[in-house]
Each structure stands twice: as C-alpha cells, then as structure tokens.
Image (tube, rainbow, N blue to C red):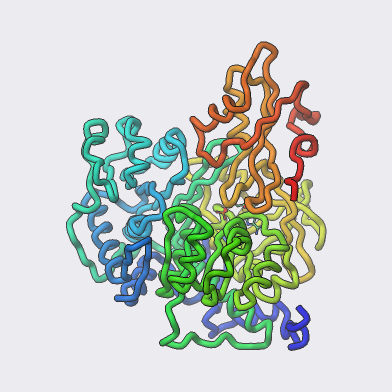
Amino acid sequence: MSNSSATGWPAISVADAQARLTAAGSPFETVLRPVRGQLLKTWAKGPQTMRDVLARVREHGEKTFIVLEDERVSYGDFHKAVSRMAAAFVAMGIEPGDRVAVTMRNLPEWPVTVCAAIAIGAIATPLNAWWSREELVYGLKDSGAKVAIFDPERLARVAEDLAGLPALKHILVARGEGAAPLEAQIGPVTDWAALPDADLPSIGAPGAAMGPDSAATLFYTSGTTGRPKGAVGSHRAFTSNILTQQFVAARAFLRRGEIMPARPANAPQRATLMAVPLFHVTGFSAILTPLMFNGDKLVLMRRFDAGQALALIERERISTAGGVPTIAWQLVDHPDREKYDLSSLERVAYGGAPCPPELSRRVREVWPHAAPSAGWGMTETCAVFANNTAEDYLAKPDSCGPPTPLGEWKVMRPDGTEAATGEVGELWVRGCTVAIGYWNNPQATEETFGGGWLRTGDLARLDDDGFAYIVDRAKDMLIRGGENIYCIEVENLLAEHPAVDEAALIGLPHRTLGEEPGAVVRLREEGTADEAELRAFVAARLAGFKVPVRVFFAAEALPRNANGKLIKAELRERFAQPEPA
Ligand code: ADP
C-alpha cells in the first residue's frame, strides 16, 4: 500500500468514481427502467440479450475461442455450431419458455447448446455434472425439460430413468460414440454429430418472444428444504456482466486518478483459464459471457490439476485465472510454480466463497503484475453483484467490495429494521440482475424474493464507503471449494439410514478448500454402523462433494436450542478442530 499512497491513491472516492463513470454520455451510463414492477438501474448501452451477444461473437471470425487439450474452436466455427443447434431446436418444436437441459462436463458443446437455447427464447437449464443419478433425475423432472443434451458419461448415469420423464421429448448426446447400445433402454437418441448444417447470419428470436427481461437461464442451487431449487435468470442478468466487468476495471483506474486506456487493436488476445465448471453462474455469467463478447480465448481443462494449470498458463499466455479461492490457493502454493513463465497473468479473480485476506497478499507477492480481485454473488444474483479489486482490495482484503452500479444493498436486523453502518445483520440486495424467482416454487420465491429484495442468508456489515464484509452465513450451508452443500440435505439422508437416530453436518476447516463436510451422528440404541458404511450410504445417493470426509459418533443426544434446532456452534467447537499447520 505504501507505493499507492505515495502516488496519491485514492484520487477520488468510490462514490464519486461511480457517479462520474455512470453519468449521461459515459459508456457506463445507467438509466432507470421498469423491471418486474420496480424502477431499477440498468446499463443504458451495451448488449441486452443473447441475440446481441451472438451478433458480436460472429464478428470475431477466425480468432480462437475455445481450447480444450488439442482442440481449438474459432469464433466463426462456434457461431456456425450455435446456428446449427438453434435450427435443430426449432425443428424439434422447442418454443420460447421451454426448458433445455444441458448435462455435461466443460466441453465446447456446452456453450454451443446453452447459447442456442437462450437465443431462440428457450430457458437453458444447466445441471451440475457432479450430481448423482437421483439428483440429475430430480433436475430433469423439476425443470420439466423438453430436450436434454448429455455427454456419454451423464447419459449413462440416468439412462434407466429417462423413459419415466413424460415432459422429455428429445435426447441428444455429444461425443456419443458408443451411445447406440443405450438406445434399447432409452429410445431414440440424436447424435450431435449428425445434426444438419445451418449457418444463419443472425441467430435468435427478435421481438416479443425475447426481451431483456424474459427468462433465459435456470441454474440450480440447493435450498433450505434440502431439495435443489432452480433460480430463473433473465437475459439482462447475464448480459449486464459484460459492462460490469469493464466498469470494475475502469473504476480501479479512476481511483488512481487515471482514465482506463483503450486496448490497442493489435494487443495480444486475452485468455482465461476456465478452472471452474461452466454449469454455475460464475462460469457462465461472470466468465463466459463477457469473454465471448470481448473475443477473448477460453481455455478449458478436462479436470482441474494445479500443475497442468500452470503449464497451460505458460503455453496459452493466460491473462486471467482463478474462479474460486481454492483454485487461486493451489496455483500460488504449487511447488513447481517458479518453473513456468507466468508473466502473461494480468488478473487473478475469484469469488463464490469466503476469500481469506491472506490470499490477496499472496497473489500480490507471487505475481506483482497481476491484480487480485474478489467478487461476491450467488446463484440468485446471477453472478457478480459486488467486486473488490486492485488497491481497494489490498487496502480492504477482507471485503468483497461495493456493489456494482446496478445493485443496491442493505443490512437488516432480525426485527426487520435496517442496521447501522458497521453492525452485522442479514444482507438484502436488489437490482435488475437478481433472479426472477425460483422455478415452480412460489412459496420459496416469496420467502426469498418477496417485497422486491433478495434475502441472501449471508451475514454482513457495511463500512462508511459502502464496502461489505461477509462475516458468516445465516443459512445452514457449507462451501467446499466452490460447491455449496446444504447441511439439511445430507442430514436428512443420514437420518434415513436405519442405524442413525440424529445427524448434523458441520464444516471442518480446510486451508485451500475453505471447509469440508463432517458429520456428527448419534446411532439408535440397537443400531450399528461405522464411518465407512455411512459415507458409502451418502456416496450412493448424493454427489461426491457432499460426502462427509469424517463421521464423528456422539454418545448422547445432539445439542439443540429451545426450538429444537441443532446448535452447530457447539458441535463445531467439539468436533471441528482446526487443521494442523
Ligand atoms: P456461486 O455460484 O456464485 O458460488 P452460490 O449460490 O453457489 O453462488 O453461492 C453463493 C454463496 O456463496 C453466497 O450466498 C455466500 O454465502 C458465498 N459467497 C459468495 N461470494 C462470497 C465472498 N466473496 N465471500 C464470502 N462468501 C461468499
């Protein structure tokens, strides 16, 4: 910080920087527009629907868009593939508002399918590729998807169940050599490679069928009842991230008293290492959407490995890496880090989970040329709602920053009054990028989004500059790496085991993953089950990341408060010992 203060940072307050950047005539001008019955700030200019994004994508022509191992896909070829997929959806009878489920690992076919579905006015419904068979079937059924696109691994996982989904009319498989034997079980499966060619100059349904505030995406997040809930996002929600990302960079310049320089036309192509899944809002809205609009390169990995990631940063001249704090930790901590030329890194950006202040310092120390950046958001905010970067982040390394110009927030006391500056309470947020509501779940929608504010379930305080500090969670949830685990889902499942009387899930601290799930279980008097059996019981039904890494057995009843709620703090104190250094 000493350097920055020597140059007079900050030159201008955050509020003034924001006011200047969003004034009339600026590229980041904001205007109030009616959005779902409220007047909310929106970007005055810039892309507003998937159709606008795809028009720009087409202009990037021969530039490389996606790299996966030895495969390279140009923007032009990507546009053709989206066009072919969109034509195929229309031929299948997919209409605006229909759900298109996409269930695969990070393959180039993922953005093709998702962009095509959204462009024709359908609702793209990405399902978590780590989900178990039961979880995937739940997602397909709950969304009522009319078409589902799988990779072969995911298709095999649910093959026996597809016939039992009456809404599902079409099944497609990408890279499905060897899927033919499954047809006996499932019925006809369309092979992605066999789709007829189409090369539409412009893709998308114009007009009434698809406006900025119509539904575009359905991303599942777990819920307090234990069953995943789908948050419906609009076109505006994901397209707004394009200007938001540029705004955050411009704000950092202005705080230094500088105007953000335009990027020279002959500057090397920027590249992002995609180490997080595409199927969460971070991957799709915060990373993929701005990247493809800007014509940058997306480098995918089959599975994340920090050593391979370092080699890729060198080979592909990666400018942005990160995603979630876990990934950033593994990169800065890697013993081989110094063997690679990582000088191309400009930004190490992460969010979606608590970001330890030490991480910002480590990133700065290891890569002085790369700006660390932390964001806060949730599935229900359709990605980045707040962002802290550059000098601001180094000055306040435990904050996730101020909200972007499109968002407002406040901290609320349990009695429904607004907390004072500095006082901890629940963070409530509002803005045009907040999800429309939960799919098919008016009760949960009212509880979480009712009254025009989204109750985040995060406990936070705000400072005098409007920066937020997330201090805890009111919702009973753990985040392992970047994956959320709603405790009640695992607790309910453990309680179904015949030997289990009561179960509680607690977070066990982990330096790079943040936390891992541990279970505290009390067995029935006559019950017998050991740790391995209970772990296997969960593993057979839920995604691997939700399986407790340890099971502790309690001899007496688990501690509960007067309302019968588990007192997790007490359990954590007894069982969740900090990791030895
Ligand atoms: P995402 O896909 O962005 O991770 P989720 O809905 O899965 O969205 O998780 C959102 C939750 O993650 C937030 O409500 C909060 O508890 C946590 N979270 C996100 N960003 C941060 C952050 N910067 N600091 C602390 N917690 C965070």
- Give residue 559's position: percent from left, percent from top: 78, 28
Q: Nearer the viewer, residue 353 or 86?
A: 353
Look at the image and tell me whether residue 118 can be seen: no
Q: Vertically, is 332 above or below 460?
A: below
In percent of the image, x 76 and y 52: which residue is there? 425
User: In the figure, residue 428 lies in which quadrant?
Assistant: bottom right
Q: Classify residue 475 as left or right of residue 277.
A: right
Q: Vertically, is 382 above or below 487?
A: below
Q: Vertically, is 490 above or below 361?
A: above
Q: Specify the farthest residue to the top.
A: 526
Q: Nearer the viewer, residue 180 or 485?
A: 180
User: In the figure, residue 188 lies in which quadrant?
Assistant: top left
Look at the image and tell me whether residue 81 can be seen: yes
> Could you tell me which quadrant the N terminus lies in?
bottom right
Q: Nearer the viewer, residue 552 or 443?
A: 552
Q: Classify residue 225 as left or right of residue 271.
A: right
How many labels sit on residues?
Answer: 0
- Give residue 392's position: percent from left, percent from top: 70, 74
Q: Nearer the viewer, residue 336 or 181?
A: 336
Q: Quadrant of ligand 1?
A: bottom right
- Give residue 301's position: percent from left, percent from top: 43, 58
- Give residue 201's position: percent from left, percent from top: 24, 71
Q: Classify residue 189 as left or right of residue 311.
A: left
In percent of the image, x 44 and y 71: which residue is there? 315
In percent of the image, x 70 and y 76: which residue is there? 391
